[in-house]
Image: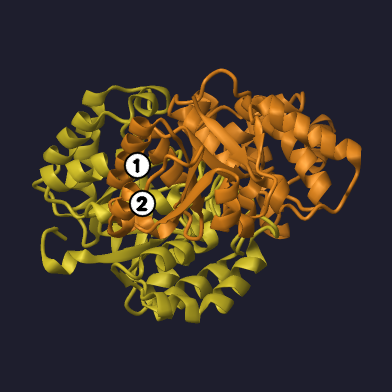
């Protein structure tokens, strides 16, 4: 059973110190399936003496070169083992290291928590492999705060690997994002994996056509999984499918034999302005063209 | 280009900012910026750039023709759907490389093409023969390779073995590959085909850089990247992050130094055409 120690609050610079926002954030995290908060900072995480006093054995794994030194240490005085790795381990035989560590943990009836410092963007991949090797516990933080593995990316990746049980409710992510942005005063990048506002925006003719026929063609998971929605954006690369879907989405009627003219106008506006056409501007264009046809 | 020489441990970045990156609703390259961008990559020492889709229209074709006449060393590739009409549009631009994208997963074959595997193989051979009839090199991309049947893909690759294909690209179209799945997929193609293998990864689960690096570990020679990872949804493999991560271990083209020397200029160009706050490092 997967257990995640969330480090978001220990790493977040809280801008809005409202008790109710903080409470809402914690409640949403819990509803998501996160039971445990990591309430001390990254500096303390690698402070071995402090952790030792708390019954935690903390080791830094650099690869096969120090794996045996970790395995040969006595773990019996510890309640929990923490293994910290830099993601540079990705170019070593990390799977062998993970398997050996997990085997030792099983024999000694200890739990290992994996902490990956995500400097080179290998963190999610390493955590996924950790879980596929049999690991159950790791540290993550929303939006990758503090250099930890992004909670949202690793949870959805594990969901797609069918390694999460039903106690995780990923539809809470959209609420969690709102709560996070309120507390931290920081917005997620619009194309941030999983939680960016624009990741389910589709515009190019090829993609809209594929999504129209079957959304899974160009989506790794349905937006509803994380409580989000898909949106068609009209741009200079849009095709007839996009215009048709947009008309349908906005509840607008337009004669089918005039669709090519409408598409040309949309592309021309986008080309001239260098921007995508907004829903309001599209509605105005449709109404104007319908008016012109009547006269 | 065939694999299995020492030269092949070089890893070539293939920039697809102007094709896949530009398909994001939040990137709006005008012709002038596209040209500046492509010529800058030529100067940096990129081996190849996927510069556009000729079938998109006259403006795109005019840009590609102009680029072909002004570029120096960089190879210009055009992206095509698997049909003769798209390829004919590419002929009009006389690119260095005609890239044909082939949807290989059963889902795409059935729902997008509304055809079957048998038709796909026949059409692929017809298109490759047609594309090979001019002077351009031909590369093939297996779209949605991460969700396709490996046996079917290998059978397609086998059917292509008598053509002079310069690269075979495996695309993780929706960004779902894990490292071990990447290793298995790329490993099989390296073992069972003679083609130079390329990969095209997406960042939907935050693993675009990791899966591209895993593919390189198992022998991939070409890696598609975009500047700052711009692209549809959560974007593509970020050229800077990927280069930074693998440069201690592999000889990459262009070199990490050349790329970072021009970072400010690339960033300025990208900021003029991409939405602010879209991608973290932009």
Residue B76 is situated, as x and y percent measured from the top left of the image, at 35, 65
Label 2: which residue? A70
Chain containing the residue with disc 1: A
Asked if labels 1 and 2 share a chain, the reply is: yes
Label 1: which residue? A101
In this view, B198 is above or below B264: above
- The quarter holding residue A197 reads top right
Residue A10 is situated, as x and y percent measured from the top left of the image, at 71, 50
- The answer to whether one can see residue B88 in this image is no
Circle 2: is it few (<14), some (14-19), or many (20+) Cα within 10 Å? Answer: some
Chain B drawn colour: yellow
Describe the element under mark 1 as helix, strand or loop. helix
- The answer to whether one can see residue A9 in this image is yes
Circle 1: is it few (<14), some (14-19), or many (20+) Cα within 10 Å? Answer: some
- Name the one closer to the observer, B239 or B71: B239
User: In terms of sequence position, does the residue under pointer 1 or pointer 2 come before the other?
Assistant: 2
What's the CA distance linking mark 1 and mark 2? 9 Å
């Amino acid at each position: 059973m997967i257990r995640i120690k969330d480090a978001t609050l220990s790493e977040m610079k809280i801008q809005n110190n409202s008790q109710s926002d903080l409470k809402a954030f914690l409640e949403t995290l819990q509803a998501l399936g996160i039971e445990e908060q990591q309430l001390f900072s990254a500096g303390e995480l690698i402070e071995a003496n402090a952790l030792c006093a708390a019954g935690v054995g903390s080791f830094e794994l650099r690869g096969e070169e120090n794996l045996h030194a970790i395995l040969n240490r006595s773990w019996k005085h510890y309640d929990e083992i923490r293994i910290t790795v830099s993601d540079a381990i990705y170019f070593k035989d990390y799977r062998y290291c993970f398997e050996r560590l997990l085997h030792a943990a099983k024999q000694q009836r200890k739990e290992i928590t994996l902490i990956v410092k995500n400097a080179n963007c290998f963190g999610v991949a390493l955590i996924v492999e950790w879980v596929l090797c049999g690991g159950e516990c790791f540290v993550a933080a929303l939006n990758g705060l503090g250099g930890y593995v992004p909670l949202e990316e690793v949870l959805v990746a594990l969901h797609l690997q069918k390694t999460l049980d039903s106690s995780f409710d990923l539809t809470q992510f959209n609420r969690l994002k709102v709560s996070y942005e309120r507390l931290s005063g920081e917005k997620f990048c619009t194309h941030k994996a999983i939680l960016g506002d624009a990741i389910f925006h589709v515009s190019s003719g090829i993609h809209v056509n594929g999504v129209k026929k079957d959304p899974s063609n160009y989506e790794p998971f349905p937006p509803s999984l994380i409580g989000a929605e898909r949106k068609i954006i009209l741009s200079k690369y849009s095709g007839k499918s996009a215009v048709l879907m947009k008309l349908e989405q906005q509840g607008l009627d337009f004669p089918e034999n005039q669709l090519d003219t409408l598409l040309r106008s949309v592309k021309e506006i986008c080309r001239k302005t260098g921007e995508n056409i907004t829903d309001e501007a599209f509605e105005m264009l449709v109404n104007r063209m319908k008016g012109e046809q009547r006269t | 280009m065939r694999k299995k020489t020492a030269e092949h441990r070089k890893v070539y970045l293939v920039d697809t900012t102007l094709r896949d990156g530009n398909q994001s609703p939040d990137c709006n390259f005008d012709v002038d910026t596209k040209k500046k961008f492509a010529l800058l990559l030529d100067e940096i020492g990129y081996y190849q750039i996927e510069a556009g889709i000729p079938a998109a229209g006259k403006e795109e074709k005019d840009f590609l023709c102009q680029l072909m006449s002004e570029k120096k060393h960089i190879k210009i590739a055009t992206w095509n759907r698997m049909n003769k009409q798209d390829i004919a549009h590419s002929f009009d631009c006389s690119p260095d490389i005609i890239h044909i994208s082939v949807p290989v997963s059963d889902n795409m074959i059935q729902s997008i093409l509304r055809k079957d595997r048998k038709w796909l193989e026949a059409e692929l051979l017809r298109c490759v023969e047609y594309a090979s009839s001019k002077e351009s090199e031909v590369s093939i991309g297996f779209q949605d390779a991460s969700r396709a049947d490996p046996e079917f893909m290998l059978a397609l690759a086998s059917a292509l073995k008598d053509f002079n294909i310069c690269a075979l690209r495996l695309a993780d179209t929706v960004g779902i590959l894990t490292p071990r799945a990447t290793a298995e997929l790329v490993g099989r193609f390296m073992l069972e085909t003679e083609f130079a293998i390329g990969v095209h990864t997406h960042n939907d689960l935050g693993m675009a850089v990791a899966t591209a690096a895993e593919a390189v570990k198992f022998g991939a020679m070409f890696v598609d990247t975009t500047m700052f990872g711009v692209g549809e949804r959560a974007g593509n493999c970020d050229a800077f992050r990927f280069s930074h991560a693998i440069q201690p271990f592999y000889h990459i083209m262009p070199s990490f130094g050349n790329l970072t020397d021009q970072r400010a200029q690339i960033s300025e160009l990208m900021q003029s055409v991409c939405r602010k706050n879209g991608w973290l490092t932009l």
